Amino acid sequence: MRGSRWKFLAGWSPTVIAAGLASPAMADQFLDQVKAEVLMFASPQSGWRGPTSAPKPDPGKRIAYVSTDEQMGASHEWGRAIKEAAARIGWQVTIIDGHGTPEGWLQGLTQAIALRMNGIVTDADATSLKQVIKEADDRGIVVVGIHAAAFPGPQPDVGLFVNIEEDPRDIGRAQADWIIAHSNGTARVIVTSSCEYAIACAKAHAAEARINECKGCRVLEFSSSPMSEVSQRQPALVAAWVLKYGTPLYITSVADYTADFQVPALTAGGVDPKDVIIVSADGNKSAYQRIRAGGRYQQVTVSEPLEMLGYQAVDELNRGFHKMPPSGFVQSPYLVTPENVDAEGGDENAFIPSNNYQQHYLALWGVQ
């Protein structure tokens, strides 16, 4: 177990848990631990855990946001938030659409370099763009990632000043905890991913590993397909899984965008929403709407504060421009369920932490 966040699991390990599940008492204890984590992930996030100091921004900086795909809700919202935050400190932002392909991401970064930007933010997978990111670094351009690498923090191996995201291992764990608790330790699960993104693969494998700790649960299949092809592939895949494995089923996905194409196929196939439950991530508007409505297959998303990550990207760029280290701030995941769907910004179909992040960042930057 990692870090102080898992103090209530002190002394436990996957090996100890797996061995102990032969005992009904130990199985009950494991489920109790899982349910405690679900409560933690679903709790309000009102305390400010971000930075408390920052250099004053210099006005006039020019920033490019190279979006993975402007058709994806999260990518679009990050760009909107970056543009909004940057405007408050006198910076200009140009949004470049990568159209969901590695070729498009490469063209977007190349364009940003040609435009002689001071900084670049991208949510494209940095590993596939290592060479062009190095070119940006060599030209003194600060490059910040959002979901651009497997894990948060500085990423010198791929040239990122810092990568901003919730820890995907925690996101996958939160998904798996909810499934284990909801099924009372009997879940049959399809774990899906888009492993062209390092973060997506890490998230999905974390969910898989946690489910495998549950003796009465079973991962039926791990399926990875390109995010750019979900509209073509997911309808046929979900239909095939129902035919192959029967129900009940839980299906995890690394992005609510995937669920957007899974749900219509399940509806068209006449599948009972109680028999196939989708557990996804990101916290897109469509996910909140499905969870709130009920009876639309998706019951959970592990939401990220999309706007807040955009503000953090501007703050990290400012630190990079001033030759300071990154802030070190990593946001905790937030589990959205039917019980709390309208909390923490959910009434606006987004995760908006009740920690006054805008005011904190503006105060750091000296903006009234």
Image: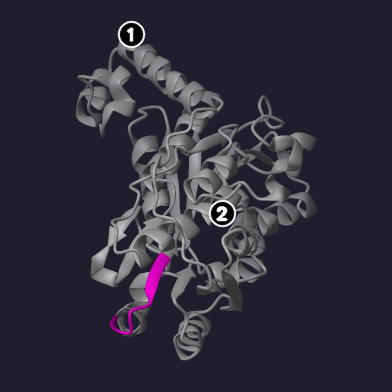
Asked if 190 appears above or below 73 in the picture, the reply is: above
Asked if 139 appears above or below 265 in the picture, the reply is: below
Which residue in the structure is indicated by mark 2? 255
Residue 110 percent across, percent down from the top left: 45, 88
Asked if 89 appears above or below 53 in the picture, the reply is: below
**Residue 329 or residue 227, whichever sits in front:** 329
Residue lying at the far bottom of the rendered structure: 114
Q: Quadrant of the N terminus?
A: top left
Q: Which range is magenta?
A: 138-144
Marks 1 and 2: which is nearer the front?
Answer: 2
Kindly indicate the quadrant of the structure image that contains residue 346: top right
Residue 321 percent across, percent down from the top left: 37, 67
Q: Residue 45, labelled with which disc?
A: none
Residue 160 percent across, percent down from the top left: 33, 67
Q: Residue at 76% of width from left, 52% of height from top?
A: 269
Q: CA distance from mark 1 to mark 2?
A: 36 Å
Left or right: residue 155 compared with residue 43: left
Q: Residue at 47% of width from left, 68% of height from top?
A: 121
Q: How many badges with numbers are in the image?
A: 2
Q: Does the segment drawn in magenta span residue 191?
A: no
Which residue in the structure is indicated by mark 1? 25
Looking at the rendered structure, the kind of residue marked 2 is: Ala
Kindly indicate the quadrant of the structure image that contains residue 12: top left
Q: Earlier in the sequence, mark 1 or mark 2?
A: 1
Q: Does the segment drawn in magenta span residue 139?
A: yes
Q: Residues within 10 Å of mark 2 (few under 14, many from 20)?
A: many
Tell me if I can see residue 351 in this picture. yes
